[in-house]
């Protein structure tokens, strides 16, 4: 802007003022584009393929080089991974064979739950895992009950008679291997939070995202075909170690559904840590939650940006640029108004 603004102390013409505003608008648009690219979902630069499951599902199987292994009724096709068919008493799971050593990450899951069952006549649901052990069948959506790590449950059938929530219901749980998931009460006693979401038999794609960064766990859903995330769970004080495995599992009982995973994409979040955090052995952390604050106390991004990271880099630059432009524009407008008044006053003398 030097050639526009260096007119002996200010802008002497309205034409110069308009030129300045045009240049400022162009520059601001470019910077805004760069910042938006930094927080856009699905940034391929940060996609970790060794922890991602995508079509055509190469690297899935029981070979030594496979990055994903499956168990039970799981069927891998060219279009989806079906954890269970729409049949009674089925269990299936798929697990990443590569442990994850990222401190800050975000998992996007595209899934589909569908079947012939009518309202309240379907079950049981899908569970998404980040746990110490893998491929251990059990009673919790076909995984073992006393797990170490994080579980996010997409529960489609209510086992409890309580009427304070509607199903399907999404909830999260952190376990250090000492707490049983209470199926009879739909995990109420151990859940960190949750929300209802109409995910069954939708004609459009349905998504769920899990973000863990600097002790904050956030779960978001996109199930209404609006291409925007809706907050489901947001809670701080969560401690998860590195070196655990990602997985997905599902189960049916007397009632059933097709439980399909279309993709699981893991992204690395670029977050700065203190020297003390960097020197910590993250593999030795015990999974835990410190519920010292209300989950609402941890909300720091009311705009809905989901893959947003702390205010560093381009975002800080944008804020400073906006502040500077605001000051400059106010000064220019003031100078123009002052000059016009001076010229008008001279005409009266």
Image (tube, rainbow, N blue to C red):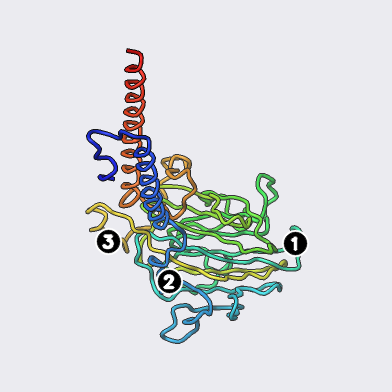
Horizontally, residue 116 falls left or right of residue 145, namely right
Q: CA distance from mark 2 to mark 1?
A: 34 Å
| Above or below for 327 versus 311 | above
Callout 1 crowding tier (Cα within 10 Å): few <14, some 14–19, many ≥20: some
Identify the mark nearer the N-term, 2 or 3. Answer: 2
- Mark 2 touches mark 1? (CB < 8 Å): no
Residue drawn at (49%, 57%), measured in percent from left and top?
Answer: 179
- Tell me how far mark 2 sits from mark 3, CA to CA: 21 Å
Along the line of sight, the residue nearer the viewer: 13 or 127:
13
Instruction: Give neighbour class at mark 2: few <14, some 14-19, many 20+ (Cα, 10 Å).
Output: many
| Residue 33 place in picture, x, y as percent | 41, 54
Question: Can you identify the residue that label 3 sits on?
Answer: 281
The quadrant holding residue 205 is bottom right
Q: Foreground residue, 55 or 22? A: 22
Query: Relative to the observer, which residue lies in front, 166 or 288?
Result: 166
Check disc 1 and report the residue beneath it. Answer: 121
């Amino acid at each position: 802007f030097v050639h526009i603004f260096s007119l002996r102390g200010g802008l002497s013409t309205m034409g110069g003022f308009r030129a300045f505003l045009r240049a400022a608008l162009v520059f601001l648009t470019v910077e805004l584009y760069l910042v938006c690219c930094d927080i856009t979902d699905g940034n391929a630069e940060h996609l970790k393929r060794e922890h991602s499951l995508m079509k055509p599902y190469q690297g899935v199987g029981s070979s030594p080089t496979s990055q994903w292994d499956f168990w039970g009724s799981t069927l891998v096709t060219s279009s989806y991974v079906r954890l269970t068919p729409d049949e009674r008493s089925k269990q299936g799971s798929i697990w990443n064979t590569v442990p994850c050593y990222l401190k800050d990450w975000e998992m996007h899951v595209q899934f589909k739950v569908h079947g012939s069952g009518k309202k309240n006549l379907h079950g049981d649901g899908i569970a998404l895992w980040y746990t110490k052990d893998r491929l251990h069948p059990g009673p919790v959506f076909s995984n073992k009950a006393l797990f170490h790590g994080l579980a996010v449950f997409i529960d489609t059938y209510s086992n409890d008679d309580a009427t304070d929530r509607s199903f399907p219901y999404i909830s999260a749980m952190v376990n250090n291997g000492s707490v049983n998931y209470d199926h009879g009460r739909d995990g109420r006693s151990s859940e960190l939070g949750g929300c209802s979401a109409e995910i069954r038999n939708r004609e459009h794609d349905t998504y769920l995202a899990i973000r863990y960064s600097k002790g904050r766990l956030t779960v978001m859903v996109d199930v209404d075909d609006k291409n925007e995330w809706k907050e489901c769970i947001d809670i701080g004080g969560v401690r998860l170690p590195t070196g655990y495995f990602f997985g997905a599992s599902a189960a049916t009982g007397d009632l059933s559904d097709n439980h399909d995973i279309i993709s699981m994409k893991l992204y690395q979040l670029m977050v700065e840590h203190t020297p003390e955090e960097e020197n910590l052995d993250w593999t030795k952390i015990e999974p835990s939650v410190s519920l010292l604050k209300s989950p609402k106390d941890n909300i720091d991004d009311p705009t809905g940006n989901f893959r947003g990271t702390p205010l560093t880099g381009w975002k800080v630059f944008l804020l400073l640029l906006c502040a500077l432009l605001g000051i400059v524009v106010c000064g220019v407008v003031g100078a123009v108004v002052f000059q016009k008044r001076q010229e008008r006053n001279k005409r009266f003398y």
